[in-house]
Image (tube, helix red, strand yellow):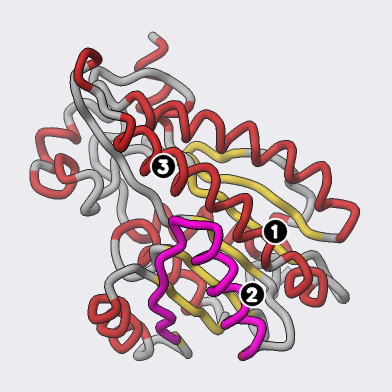
């Protein structure tokens, strides 16, 4: 039991790991003993984040643009050239777009849906062999980062974002059924208000946002890291195809 949440000896890849929720997850994985690769589109930002996170444990920067299938496959090849196996994949890289219904553009649809829903599938596909090698002794893990906006509706006109996150939640279930036969466990996390570049309101107006959260605050690093560590570790081995809501009660408050 004392090693239930240990990630010692595990190799992880966190997309969008240089900031926000991705960085929170990378921080938690490092603290629990994993070797972590982080990737982001902006190389300087990715390198700087890896340098700072290396104070906790081994963290390597692999700048990449995973918004296309070609980019996802190139990243997978880089990981497989460096590591004999991959044990944890966190599909976190994402985008959002808000615009009025009558003017919402195709570019805002394609950019968001491609990165939020297509990339997690094709990156996992490209890393399937590496994950299978990582699953020989105990399950490898895939964690898809969705959103509570894929579960309940907010007041913003973020059509492609909400659709992509709802799709990712269902895709997580479908992937989980297929990959379980390879000893690869797939689950998701649906964050609520966490301070990030994507959620500037929670970042810049946290006290105001906190009034709308039943828990009375926005999420912090420990909240997001805790959920990821649980799913990535032995503690989460028997959780399959689920998406854990981590939102301080926002979703149930919307429902009421």
Residue 131: give x, y in percent of width and height.
Answer: 74, 69
Is residue 20 rendered magenta in the image? no
- Distance (Cα) linking label 3 and label 2: 23 Å
Classify residue 81 by image quadrant.
bottom right
The residue lying at 50 percent from left, 37 percent from top is 245
Residue 71 in picture, x, y percent from top left: 49, 66
Q: Residue at 23% of width from left, 44% of height from top?
A: 199
Q: Is residue 23 left or right of residue 80?
A: left
Name the residue beneath numbered marker 3. Answer: 191
Quadrant for the C terminus, please.
Answer: top left
Residue behind mark 1: 125
> Around disc 1, counting alpha carbons within 10 Å, would you say few (fewer than 14), some (14 to 19), or many (20 or more)?
some
- Quarter of the rendering containing residue 89: bottom right
Tell me what residue is drawn at x 30 percent, y 59 percent.
20
Q: Nearer the viewer, residue 109 or 25?
A: 109
The circle drawn on residue 149 is none
Question: Is 77 positioned to the left or the right of 218 in the image?
Answer: right
Local crowd size for mark 3, using a 10 Å CA cut-off: few (<14), some (14–19), many (≥20): many
Rendered position, 171 above or below 37: above
Q: Which residue is mark 2?
A: 6
Q: Quadrant of the N terminus?
A: bottom right
Which of the two labelled residues, at mark 1 and mark 3, occupies the earlier sequence position? 1
Residue 68 screen position, x and y as percent: 48, 57
The extreme top residue here reads 256
3 or 2: tag closer to the N-terminus: 2
Q: CA distance from mark 2 to mark 1?
A: 26 Å
Q: Is residue 203 above or below residue 35?
A: above
Point out the frontmost of discs 2 and 1. 1
């Amino acid at each position: 039991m004392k090693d239930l949440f240990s990630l010692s000896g595990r190799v992880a890849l966190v997309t969008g790991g240089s900031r926000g929720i991705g960085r929170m997850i990378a921080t938690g994985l490092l603290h629990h003993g994993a070797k972590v690769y982080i990737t982001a589109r902006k190389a300087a930002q990715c390198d700087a984040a890896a340098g700072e996170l290396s104070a906790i444990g081994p963290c390597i920067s692999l700048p990449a643009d995973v918004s296309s299938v070609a980019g996802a496959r190139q990243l997978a090849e880089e990981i497989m050239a460096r590591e004999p196996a991959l044990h944890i994949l966190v599909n976190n890289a994402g985008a959002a777009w808000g615009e009025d219904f009558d003017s919402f553009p195709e570019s805002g649809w394609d950019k968001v849906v491609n990165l939020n829903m297509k990339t997690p599938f094709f990156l996992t596909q490209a890393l399937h062999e590496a994950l299978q090698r990582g699953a020989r002794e105990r399950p490898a893990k895939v964690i898809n980062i969705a959103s509570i906006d894929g579960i309940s509706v907010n007041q913003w006109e973020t059509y492609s974002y909400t659709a992509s996150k709802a799709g990712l939640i269902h895709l997580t279930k479908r992937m989980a059924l297929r990959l379980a036969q390879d000893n690869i466990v797939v689950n998701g996390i649906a964050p609520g208000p966490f301070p990030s570049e994507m959620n500037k309101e929670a970042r810049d107006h946290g006290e105001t946002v906190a009034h709308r959260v039943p828990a009375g605050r926005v999420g912090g690093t420990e909240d997001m890291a805790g959920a990821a560590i649980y799913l990535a570790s032995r503690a989460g081995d028997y959780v399959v195809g689920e998406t854990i809501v981590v939102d301080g009660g926002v979703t149930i408050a919307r429902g009421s």
